[in-house]
Amino acid sequence: MVYDIAINKAWEGLAELNTGRNFSVTFFGDEYSVEPAKKQVLSLACNVPAKDFTAILILHYLAQEIKGLPALAGQWLTFRELAGIEGYEPAFRKRAIEPLISKYGSNPQGLFNVTGRLPAKKVEGADAAVILEAFKGVPALIKIWSQDEEFSSDANIYFDASIVKIFCTEDIVVLAGIIAGKL
């Protein structure tokens, strides 16, 4: 019910592209079937409809994919560096950063365990860092720092600058929360 307006708008946006066919979208390594005629986004791994907030992200991504995904910019930006984030930073911190600190702050190396179950790879940076591909062409860089004598543990999620051509700020907050939950 909370997402009714957003999901209806996402379906309308897809309908405007007038494709008339079904699609398959990979999200965090799982396949989802998108059936516009039924207005259904189905997880093929679980054979259940996607949660509304997941379906909205998938529909927004799919609409942009149909139009043409932007090339990766090759520039990692923090959420704070993205345009139009005013007012969203507290939600981003609560949904994404705090759960990462809680889970990995005392053991950053534990982050590397995700590389076996998610489309992620270990990279250099911070005390632990991975690049995770949420969607094809939508990578996220996750960095964890452990506590030391001067600073408490911290975390951050960086996005390729191209993400703003795919998702709105609200979608990026939701995506970051999903990333934190999957890690």
Image: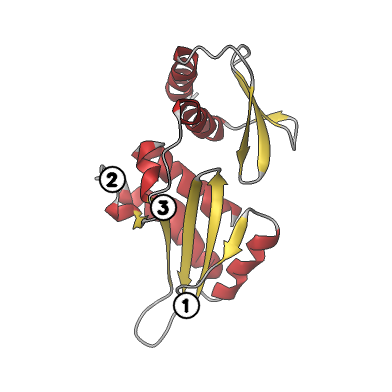
Residue depicted at 36% across the width and 37% down the height:
165
The quadrant where residue 97 appears = bottom left
* Residue 55 picture location, percent across and down: 55, 30
For mark 2, what is the residue? 85
For mark 1, what is the residue? 146
Local packing at callout 1 (Cα closer than 10 Å; few below 14, some 14-19, many 20+) is some
Q: CA distance from mark 1 to mark 2?
A: 27 Å
**Residue 128 in view of the camera:** yes
Q: Depth-wise, is mark 3 or mark 1 nearer the camera?
A: 3
Q: Is residue 100 above or below residue 135?
A: below
SS at mark 3 in the image = strand
SS at mark 2 in the image = loop
Q: CA distance from mark 3 to mark 2?
A: 13 Å
> Is 44 left or right of 176, judged from the image as shown?
right
Residue depicted at 49% across the width and 46% down the height:
138
> Is 72 left or right of 47, judged from the image as shown?
left
Q: Amino acid at mark 3?
A: Phe
The quadrant where residue 130 appears = bottom right
* Residue 4 picture location, percent across and down: 47, 21
The tag on residue 159 is 3
Q: Amino acid at mark 2?
A: Ile
Residue depicted at 45% across the width and 26% down the height:
67
The tag on residue 5 is none
Q: Depth-wise, is mark 3 or mark 2 nearer the camera?
A: 3
